[in-house]
Amino acid sequence: MRIFSGRRRFAAVAVTAAVAGLAGGLVVAHEDSSSALAQGPPRVIAQGKFRSLTWNTLGTASLVRESSGNLQLHLSHDFFTKHAPELYVYLVKLRGQQRIFWKEVGLLKGSEGGQAYSVGSDATKPGVQVAIFCAKCNQISGLAPLAPVPSA
């Protein structure tokens, strides 16, 4: 009998622990989702117009904080640059011709049209610009200085 009651007690403890773990997980998941919703809809926190350096680059770059809290770099629907091999998007800080900060965001998805890229918090540093860079010719085709956008 003692073996049976010991097993029964173990089963009761195991079931209780499983239910408590499930309840705790639901509470944590609810808190995470409510805090993500509390951040509101996506909003533009910084923006800048491209200026051409080596060839025409037009449009706007926007830094967007998503409702999840993640940062995205958006190139506008009217974005355009000359098609070339090995075009990349970079976050940069320059002092004259010297690169103070130089971080690859990714391969440019297309030479025209809207596109989005995930970026880290370093995109919010003061003085950061978005560069369209041709690796083949080692030239920046255009720069968009990101300036904070006042919240509404």
Image (spheres, helix red, strand yellow):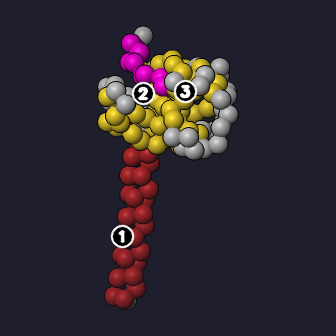
Where does the magenta region start and end?
A: 143-151
Residue 26 badge: none
Q: How far apart are marks 1 and 3 (CA)?
A: 71 Å
Query: Where on the picture, by quarter, is residue 11?
Result: bottom left
Q: Residue at x 48, y 23 (%)?
A: 144
User: Residue 12 in magenta?
Assistant: no
Q: Distance between the residues labelled 2 and 3?
A: 16 Å
Q: Which of marks 1 and 2 is nearer the N terminus?
A: 1
Q: Does the residue at mark 1 contact the one at mark 2 (Cβ under 8 Å)?
A: no
Residue 117: % across, % down: 54, 37
- Amino acid type for the residue under numbered disc 1: Val
Q: Does the residue at mark 1 contact the one at mark 3 (Cβ under 8 Å)?
A: no
Look at mark 1 in the image and give the residue it sits on.
13
- Amino acid type for the residue under numbered disc 3: Thr
Question: Left or right of 81: which side holds 67?
Answer: left
Q: Does the residue at mark 2 contact the one at mark 3 (Cβ under 8 Å)?
A: no
| SS state under label 1 | helix
Q: How far apart are marks 1 and 2 (CA)?
A: 58 Å
Residue 129 badge: 2
Residue 34 vs 2, above or below: the answer is above
| SS state under label 2 | strand
Q: Which residue is drawn at 36% across and 76% down?
A: 9
- Amino acid type for the residue under numbered disc 2: Gln
Q: Which residue is drawn at 43% across and 35% down?
A: 91
Q: Earlier in the sequence, mark 1 or mark 3?
A: 1
Residue 100 appears in view: yes
Q: How crowded is mark 1: few (under 14 residues within 10 Å), some or many (20 or more)?
A: few
| SS state under label 3 | loop
Q: Which of 58 and 77 is in front in this view?
A: 58
Query: Where on the picture, by quarter, is residue 34?
Result: top left
Q: Earlier in the sequence, mark 2 or mark 3?
A: 3
Residue 48: % across, % down: 47, 19
